[in-house]
Image (spheres, rainbow, N blue to C red):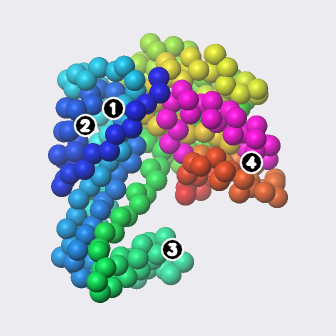
Amino acid sequence: MSPNRFQLEGPSLDELNTRVLEEHGPYAKVVAVRAVTSGGIQGFFAQRRFEIDVDVPDGTATDAHSFDLPMRAGLALLLDDADSAEARIRHADPVPHVSTSSASFDTIMADLTLNTAPGLPVVTARAPRLQAPLSAPGDLVIVVGLGNDALTIAREMALASGSSELRVAGECSSDGVKRLNDRRGVLAARAQGVRDQYGVIVALGLQRIGLDEAGSDALEFLQGDQVWVAVDVGRKPADTARWVSAVSTVVHVDAVAVIGRGATSSPNTVNELGLQVGWVESGSVG
């Protein structure tokens, strides 16, 4: 099912949370949160509102009461993260120390320039920080890749999290790691995660030729809260773009995890996919 994307705006995250459930139902997925600030002087006394992007798969019902626990957990984590960022902004020192090489420095300078330039309309939009792999109890993160590429990244994510369990599906396999073969197994894994307080990260291996019927079926029954594609930047960019595009027609892809960066002279070709890079092999989070 391909998702329809909607944008909602409101004065608080609590209000937007309620509207997502009431207007778009149990399968709605919040994929981005933005804080929009207008007015004020040098960032003070400004008015703040929130915008969220919501993906809703075609043909899904809108019964908010059937919104299941794992989906609520994923949504709550995303909104809580934005709330925490908002709290840090409100309680920050008036003149924080910020490295001039950081993205935060650029954002602050843009804010100051817009808010102090005479005669100009003021609207400062702060881009959301990319979510790290979800790890709340019952959350399910899918890492998709060719062969065992996904396993490399999924194992690193699980170890870095400290609160997620590794599972495999499709072409991926690993001794001692449980396999998910159908929707019943997925529900059982989620339920155990809620009970034992951990998230689930699934390494889904595709055939080397790319997404086939078996891979599409696995994406459907896994129904992850977050989907990453594990991309080996040493492979031909055109081949990578082909299979990543095929995955994107089945599910919403949240971010790219990069492997093989040290083995190629052109690692930045991954940017041609038009997706945000959020993980680089060896545990670096972007």
Residue 254 highlighted magenta (yes or no): yes
- Residue 137 on image: x %, y %: 36, 35
Earlier in the chain: of badge 2 and badge 4, it is 2
Asked whether the residues under the numbered discs 2 and 1 touch, taking CB atoms below 8 Å apart as contact, a structural biologist would say: yes
The residue shown at (60%, 31%) is 247
The residue tagged with tag 3: helix, strand or loop?
loop
Image: magenta residue range: 232-255
Earlier in the chain: of badge 3 and badge 1, it is 1
The residue tagged with tag 2: helix, strand or loop?
helix
Q: Which residue is mark 3?
A: 102
Which marked residue is nearer to the observer: mark 3 or mark 1? 1
Earlier in the chain: of badge 2 and badge 3, it is 2
Q: Residues within 10 Å of mark 4 (few under 14, many from 20)?
A: many
Which marked residue is nearer to the observer: mark 2 or mark 4? 2
Q: In the figure, is residue 143 to the left or right of 262? A: left
Q: Quadrant of residue 21?
A: top left
Q: Residues within 10 Å of mark 2 (few under 14, many from 20)?
A: many
Distance CA(mark 2)–CA(mark 4): 37 Å
Earlier in the chain: of badge 2 and badge 1, it is 2
- Residue 165 on image: x %, y %: 50, 33
